[in-house]
Amino acid sequence: MTLSTGFVSRCTLMVVLTTGVILSPGGMAVSHPSSTLSPSRLAQDEPTPEFAEAILGQWFSPSALGGEPLTFIFTERGILHFIITLPRGRTVSQEFRYEVGASSRNASPNAIDLILPTGERVATIAEITDSGTLRFQIEGTQAGLPRPDAFDETVAEFERVSTSTELPARLVEANALDVLIDISRAQRTHYLEFREFADSMEPLNAEPVPLETDDYRIEIQMSEDNGNQVRITATAKREDLRSFTSGVFMVPNERGLEVSMVGICRSDEPDLTAPAMPIPPETAEGNVTCAPGSHLMER
């Protein structure tokens, strides 16, 4: 089993199978403190500061993932954003921690560990060539296997896209939308069981969600005069991001029975204020209406 069939299938494909909802790490681009280098894990030599700095930023390979495109974003916090494109064109990301060392003093290639969400490490090697290409050994690596001594003919090559270490706004927004979808679904389930919405995350029996990140603030707001609805917002904290509001409603269907509905609205432009509460239809056969300046998300 190789990194692309082990590491990817166990971790990246979790993103695919859950439409991106891996809430920690990865679901909201959570900031994790970088770990100190572990001599017992990496080579005993000192890490190479030049490589650790040079690798920062965004890199792209059109064929690194079994012939499919792959983007890496290495950040100063020791976080690697692993970005793939799904069959329908949607781009998703997953976070992993990484640590850089040196395979031998003042020599190339450099040792690098990718740390999976389980805590397991994939020991591999990487280097930046004289022409500025990042060479990264993916094939033939797996958690628990020894670090490769040298690159082989399958080594993946990445071209630098930019020196920015920020996750692109479209991916940060997609992660925020996934979190709102997850919380909204949990609210629907909670209401069907207890006949009321929850005013916090604890009663929802959901995976822990970081409600405050560098990018978004998530809030649950109960209606004071209407127990049949709850508002959930993802308010942007970056000026290049759009904000979201999810309305979860109980509305009657044509037979008069209560049906749960969800409408998630996104601001049309980047906005540091979440859209107003969506307006539910009079019956379940209608559609949720977003406030001016926002529009309904399809998924």
Image (cartoon, helix red, strand yellow):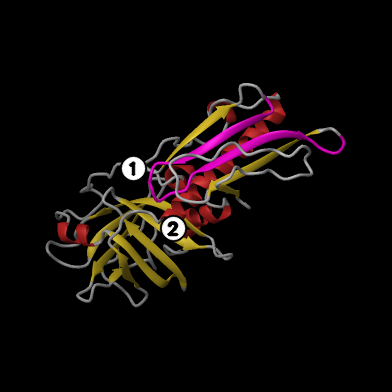
Name the kind of residue labelled 1 in the image. Answer: His
Name the kind of residue labelled 2 in the image. Answer: Phe
What's the mark number on residue 32?
Answer: 1
Q: Position of residue 147 (x, y in %)?
A: 29, 61
Label 1 packing within 10 angstroms: few (<14), some (14-19), many (20+): some
Judge whether 198 appears above or below 118 on screen.
above
Q: Position of residue 98 (x, y in %)?
A: 31, 52
- Which is nearer the eye, 245 or 109? 245
Q: Residue at left 44%, top 64%?
A: 4
Quadrant housing residue 80: bottom left
Q: Position of residue 213 (x, y in %)?
A: 39, 39
What's the mark number on residue 7?
Answer: 2
Q: Position of residue 296 (x, y in %)?
A: 62, 49
Q: Residue furthest left?
A: 106
Q: Residue furthest front?
A: 292
Q: Residue at left 37%, top 68%?
A: 60
Secondary structure of the residue carrying numbered label 2: helix
- Which is nearer the eye, 111 or 51? 51
Rounded to the nearest angstrom, the CA distance separating label 1 from label 2 is 20 Å
Q: Residue at left 41%, top 58%?
A: 82
Residue range in magenta is 227-255
Q: Do the residues bearing badges 1 and 2 touch, measured as CB atoms within 8 Å?
A: no
Is residue 143 something one can see in this rendering?
A: no
Left or right of 200 on screen, residue 36: left
Is residue 160 something one can see in this rendering?
A: yes
- Which is nearer the eye, 45 or 246? 246
Q: Is residue 218 magenta?
A: no
Q: Residue at left 20%, top 61%?
A: 51
Secondary structure of the residue carrying numbered label 1: loop
